[in-house]
Amino acid sequence: MKVFTYKNLNAEEIKALCKRTAVDFDRIEPTVREIIQAVKTQGDVALQSYTQKFDGFLPDPLVIPVPAAEDVPLSEDKKAAFDRAFANIYAFHMAQKPGDLVVETMPGVVCRREARAVEAVGLYVPGGTAVLPSTVLMLGVPAMIAGCPTRIMATPPQQDGAIAPEILYCAALTGITHILKAGGAQAVAALAYGTESVPKVHKIFGPGNQYVTCAKMLVSQSDAVVAIDMPAGPSEVLVIADETANPEFVAADLLSQAEHGADSQVVLVAQSAGFIEETLTETERQLQSLPRMEAARKALANSSAVLVEDRAQALVFSNLWAPEHLIIASENAAEYVPGIINAGSVFLGNWTPESAGDYASGTNHTLPTSGYAAMYSGVSLDSFYKMVTFQELTPDGLRELGPTVEVMAQAEGLEAHRQAVSRRLRHLS
């Protein structure tokens, strides 16, 4: 990790430090567009062909039913762990259920807002180098609570064509309605446009590699008429540590993100040069025992440690960086909270590892990366709803409000708008 002293940095250097590793979409976009077009026009045939090409397996059928939880061959200790995580995630997201909003803006004019579930959602669960049943829970639980009627989980099969039992068990817990045995850009295209086997969805959720991310961005801007949860990039963490932090814990937190992959980024922000040195030494020591050591080492090579003068300076930098995950490694973490503006999810205190949020504390781990925490929230129950507004006027309400609407419509030169009010008012006179 490269070490910088904040007070010696000018504005351009700070901007450069906050810049993330760019994904070269220009390089992969032609390939992704080709895949999307093929799936759009050829449906299941293209989807099967690309899955065989990229994953080494021809899925037939493409879409399979979800087994009952009790039928999934999984050890009882694993089931108990997933059950506990499910319960916590369910409790936190259930508490987010929106109530109906009713406001009488003036006598005889009532406006209200009600939540309606997105009818069909696609939940992308990556495969690749790791099995991620936690993502099934993070996406499946709020979709279930919201009551989305169609909930399709897309996940690449293993080389033998099977879906990992951990994935199947979490799919059963969350009431997934369809399992699509495909991943990559081809799965995103199938969800966006629909095929003979795959129902079309209205919104696609979930993380993935650069091809998945590119495909999500492209279909959201296409004639598919589909939304996505958010732009997403490599995983990241920023740790703010003061004199009460534990270097061993901080090193472990940095490595827990670095092991995601070579393109992940971690940042340490501390008020002591000695603490930074001690933490980096401890990070190197812990790194030696990690199975994913090489990926983590590459991530660390592209990461930074920043020496700041005080808490205020630490928060200024953190808000500029806008991290996906923000850890406040301090016994006085609550004192930092009012100054936190841009962050996907925040982990307070020395006993709150980021891993807890990734798996089982209850908050969602599908979060904005690459600085998008400055303008996006992470996935929540709200993500699975549309908010529909209603209004109802009584005759007296129209008498009071109508003249205002007439004047405004006339000012905008929209005569039919004005007459829609005026004709009613004449019937009331």
Image: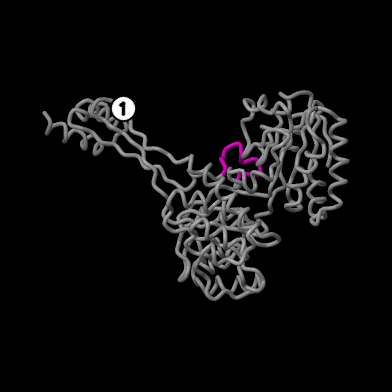
* Residue 78 versus residue 51 in the image, above or below: above
Quadrant including the C terminus: top left
Q: Amino acid at mark 1?
A: Thr
Task: Return the residue at label 1.
Answer: 105
> Residue 33 at x, y = what percent?
58, 62
Q: Who's the residue at 56% across and 45% down the image?
A: 88
Q: Is residue 167 magenta?
A: no
Q: How many residues crowd around disc 1 within 10 Å: few (fewer than 14), some, or many (20 or more)?
A: few
Q: Main secondary structure of the magenta part?
A: loop
Note whether 372 is above or below 294 in the view shown.
above
Q: Position of residue 291 (x, y in %)?
A: 80, 57
- Is residue 205 rendered to the left or right of residue 414? right
Q: Nearer the viewer, residue 343 or 250?
A: 250
Residue shown at 45% from the left, 71% from the top: 196
In the rendered image of this protein, does residue 234 appear above or below residue 65? above
Q: Is residue 375 within the magenta segment? A: yes
